[in-house]
Image: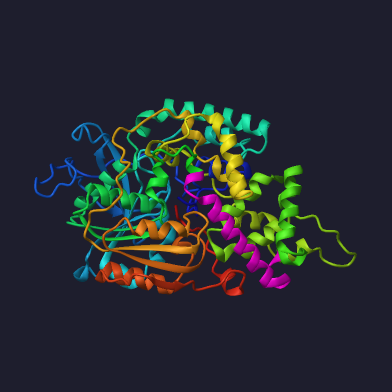
Amino acid sequence: MTQITGDLRPSRSRTAAFAALAAAGLLLGGATAAGASPSAGAGPTPPPADAAQVEAPIPDLVWEDCGEGLEGFECASAEVPSDYDDPYGPTTTIALTRLPATDPEQRIGSLFLNFGGPGGPGVANLQALGPQAYGPELRARFDIIGFDPRGVGLSDPVTCFRNADAEARWTSNLEAFPVGPQQEARFIGSWAVAGASCTAISGDRIATSSTANVARDLDLLRQAVGDTELNYLGYSYGTYLGATYGALFPDRIRALVLDGTMDPEAYTGLGDDRSIGRRTGQAVAASETYGQFLRLCAEAGPQGCALAALGDPEQVMDDLFAQLQAEPVEVPLGDGTTVTIGYDDAVTTIFSSLYAPAGWADLAAALASLVPVPEQPGTLSAQEDSLGNDSIQDLLRRVGILEDYPSMGGALASMCVDGEHPGTALDYPAQAAAAEAEAPHFGTARAWVGIQCEFTPVADEDRYTGPWEQGTDAPVLVIGTRYDPATPYAFTQPYADLWRDARMLTVEGYGHTTLATPSACADAAITNYLIHLEATDGATCEQDLAPFTAAAQEQVPATIPVG
C-alpha cells in the first residue's frame, strides 16, 4: 500500500495528480491505462496432474524484445482464466517483463516482483527501475520478472471512464480529500458518479480482481516459467499478496521477501467497521514519520532545510496549514500560468513525499515557497534563497504535485473486493473526525480512503479473507523500516509471527520499503537470503544516507516505483 510512483506518462495538472492519489486509495503505484496486449503464445496446454497448483491451463509464454529504449528487457503476455470457477472458459491477459539471468548456468529460477498497490504496475515499474535496480549477484542467478496484476496497467485494465481524457476531466475539480461539510458532500457526490461509471464499464473485471485471483495467476505464471517453487519479492501491498499466496499454496514456496508489511487482517477488515484508510494505520505512521521530518529539518538548520530558515519548522508548518485551510495559495509557474495549492494538496504531498527521505530537502523547499515572507530591500527572500536555480515548477514536479496522472481503476478493483467497508458513504465524515483526533492532518486524509468502494457494489466470490496463519515450512524474510509512513513498523513483528519460520530484518531509518530507503546492508541481506536461503532473525541495517544531507539530495531518483 504505498505510493512511490513509477509512472512515466506526460505530466497533467496539479488537481488531476492529487485526485489520482486520492483515487488510488492507499496511495499506491500508478497504473497505466493502456489497452490489453494480445497473447503472444500459441495457446495454453493442460497442466500435468501432479504439478498443477491451480486447476487451469498453464499459459504459453513467448518472450520477445520489448522495443527501443528497453534493451535487455523481454516482454510476454499470458492468458489466464477470468474466473477460476470456469478454468477453461474466458480468459484475461496478464502482461509480463523480465530481465534474464546473466549467468544462465548458475540460474536458480525466476524472481517475481510486486511493487505494491493495489494497482501498481509491475511491467512499467521494473522497466523504469532499469537493469541496475538489483545487484549483479542477484541478476546472475535469477530471471527477474515484473507483471501487471489483473485489472492493472497492460493486463486488461479496470477503467472507469470512456478514455483517459474523460477521467482527467472528472478529476479536475476533485479535492485530494474533503474538509468541512460542503466539500464532504461534493466529494461523496463525485465518487457516487465515478463508482457508478466504474461498475458500468468494468464491473465484470472488478468482480474477478481479488488478490486471491492475482495469487492464482501468480501460481500459473510460476508454472509457465518452469519453476517448481516460487521465488518472490513483494513490497507493501505485495506483502498482502505474499500472505495470500502462502495461504493458498503453502507447499509451492522456495523464498519470499516481504518488505513493508501490511497486516492482512487489518486490510480485509472482517468485523471492523473502520474505513480501510483508518484500520491500516497509515495516519498514525505518517504522523510519526512527519515528526521525524520536522526534527531532522530543525537539526539541519537554515543551511540544510529551507523551513528552518523561516523559524521553528513545526511552528512554520502549523502556520502554513492554518493559512492554507483559510485560503489556498496561487503559485506562479514559469509559463505564466498559476497552480492552486490548497490544504489537501499540501497534506497529500507531504504524505507521499515522506516515502523517500532523499527528497525531504526538496519537500521542505517546496513547502517554504508557500510561506509568505516579507522581503528586505536588496536581499533575496527566504523563498528565493531556498529555491536556488530550480523553478517552483521543477520543485512541484519533484515532490509530486505535478506528477503524471495514474488511472484509478486498477487500485480500486482489488481494494474494493478484498475487504470490508463501512457500508455507507455517510459514515466517512465521522470516520475522518475520529482519525483526525488520532493523527492531525493525516487522519482526515487517510480516513477517506475506500469511499470509492461504497459506490462500487461488486463482489468477488473467490476472494480470500483468512485464516492468515501460514502453513509453509519455507523460511521467509520479513523487513520493516523504523519510520515508515505507509506500512507501520508496528505491523512487522505481528506479520512475521504469522509464518512458521520468519527471519525479521529492521531497517533503522525513514521512508517506505528498501526501494525508497536505500541500504547496502539490507540489499546484501536480501541477496544472500534469495540465493542461499539464509537470514538472521532480529538483524538490523542502517540506511545509506541521512535525510537533509548533500549526499542524499544527489540521490533523489526521478521515479521510485513502489506500491
Q: Is residue 11 above or below residue 103?
A: above
Viewed as shown, does residue 382 lie left or right of 483? right
Q: Nearer the viewer, residue 349 or 188?
A: 188
**Where does the magenta region start and end?**
278-306
How is colour applied across the structure in the image?
rainbow
Q: Position of residue 402 (x, y in %)?
A: 61, 49
Q: Is residue 301 above or below residue 158?
A: below
The residue lying furthest to the right in this view is 377
Q: Position of residue 519 (x, y in %)?
A: 45, 71
Viewed as shown, does residue 325 lie left or right of 557? right
Instruction: Characterize the magenta stretch by its predominant secondary structure.
Output: helix
Q: Is residue 379 above or below residue 153?
A: below
Magenta run includes residue 288: yes
The residue under the point 33% across, 33% down is: 460
Magenta run includes residue 148: no
Q: Quadrant of residue 303?
A: bottom right
Q: Position of residue 527 (x, y in %)?
A: 33, 70
Q: Position of residue 485 (x, y in %)?
A: 53, 56
Can residue 483 be seen?
yes
Can residue 402 be seen?
no
Q: Nearer the viewer, residue 409 or 509?
A: 509
The residue under the point 19% across, 43% down is: 54
